Image (tube, rainbow, N blue to C red):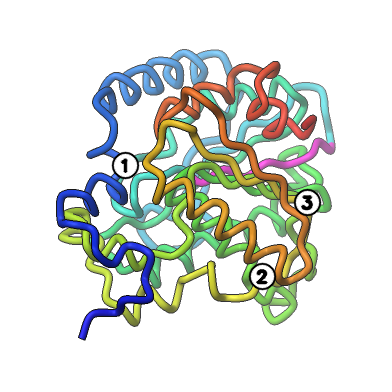
Amino acid sequence: MPDTSRLWHGLTAEEHEAQYNPRAAVADFADCQARHQGWSAAAAARLTAIRDVAYAEAPLCTLDIYPVPGLASAPVHLFFHGGYWRAQDKANFAFVAEALVASGSLAVIANYPLCPAVTLDEVVSAARDAVAWTHRHIAPYGGDPARLTVSGHSAGAHLTAAALAEDWPARGLPADIVSRAVLISGIFDPAPAIGTSVNAEIRLTPDLAARHDFERIPPRILCPCWIVAGGREPWHWIDQSFRYAQHLRRHGGDPGVLVVPGRHHFDILDLVRDEASGLGRIMCGRP
C-alpha cells in the first residue's frame, strides 16, 4: 500500500523526476559544470595546495588542503561537493577554496566514495571520517581545529547534516567539533530519490534512506547554521531546506534560512565567489 503521508505522494513520474532530480530541472547544467571547471583550473594554478591527502583507506577518501599564506592558525572550512552521492570530484571546486582562502580561511575540499561502487552507508561514513581527520590533523597545515566550519552543496549538504548528527564523543572527539555549518541546496531525506532515474546509480532502498534521513534523526551539534537554496529550484527541493530548518529548531537550534531569487540548483554556487552576495558572506563567516 503506498505511503500517502509522504509529501511527494500523488506526483506523476514526470513531476517527481522534475522535482527531485536537479539536472532534470535545469537546462544549463553543462554550462554551469564547464564554468566551474574553468574557474577551478584557474584557481588551482594560483593557489598553494596540498593535494590528494588520504583521510581513510577506501578509494576516493582524499582531500585537498589550501592553506592561507602567512597564517599559522587560520579558521578551517571543509566543503563537500554535490553530485547526488554518485558524481563529481573535488578538483571541480577549487574555485570554492579560492574564495575561502581570500577571506582568511584554510580550505579543505573533500572527495568521498561514490555510488554505485558503494552504498550511502559508506558515503556518509567517509564524510564523517573526513571531518574527524580534519580536526585531528589540520593544525600542521596551518589550520585551527577549534574553528572548523563544514559546508556542502546538494548531496554535500546532506553529508554536512550527517556531521551535525554524529556522536562525536563516541569517537573520542569534541561534541562541538563543528563550530558553524552551511548547507546549500541540500537533500536531507534521501527517500524521494528512490523515485527518480538517479536511483539506478545510487541504489537506495527505504531502509537505507531511513538510516540517513536527517529530517528525522536528531542533530547532536546545534552550532550556528545557515541553510541556503535557490529561488528557481523546484518547490519540493526548496521545501527540504525549510523542513530541515524546522527540524533543527524543534531540537533547539536557531538556523538562518536564505532563498536566493533568480538562482537554480547549480548556478547558486557562483555566488561563493562574490563576497558581496548573501551566500558569499555566509561562506566567509560574515552574514
Whether label 1 touches label 3, CB < 8 Å: no
Residue 74 part of the magenta segment: yes
Q: Quadrant of the N terminus?
A: bottom left
SS at badge 1: helix
Identify the residue at image location x=54%, y=42%.
184
Whether residue 117 appears in this view of the structure is: no
Q: Nearer the viewer, residue 207 or 82?
A: 207
Residue range (magenta):
73-80
**Which residue in the protein does label 2 denote?**
219
Between the residue at mark 1 and the residue at mark 3, the CA separation in whole angstroms equals 27 Å
Residue 268 part of the magenta segment: no
- Residue 83 lies, with reference to residue 162, above or below; the image says above
Q: Is residue 165 left or right of residue 267?
A: right
Magenta residues: mostly which secondary structure?
A: strand
- Residue 198 lies, with reference to residue 4, above or below; the image says above
Q: Nearer the viewer, residue 116 or 11?
A: 11
Q: Which mark is residue 224?
A: 3
Whether residue 261 appears in this view of the structure is: yes
SS at badge 3: loop
Identify the residue at image location x=73%, y=71%.
251
Query: On the image, which quarter does residue 195 sit in?
Result: bottom left
Q: Nearer the viewer, residue 179 or 138?
A: 179
**Which residue in the protein does label 1 denote?**
22
Q: Amino acid at mark 2?
A: Pro
* Number of residues whose C-alpha sits closer than 10 Å to that of mark 1, classed few (under 14), some (14–19) or many (20 or more): many
Q: Position of residue 264 (x, y in %)?
A: 41, 30
Q: Quadrant of the C terminus?
A: top right
Identify the residue at image location x=63%, y=75%.
218
Identify the residue at image location x=42%, y=18%.
41
Q: Earlier in the sequence, mark 3 or mark 2?
A: 2
Q: Position of residue 173 (x, y in %)?
A: 75, 70
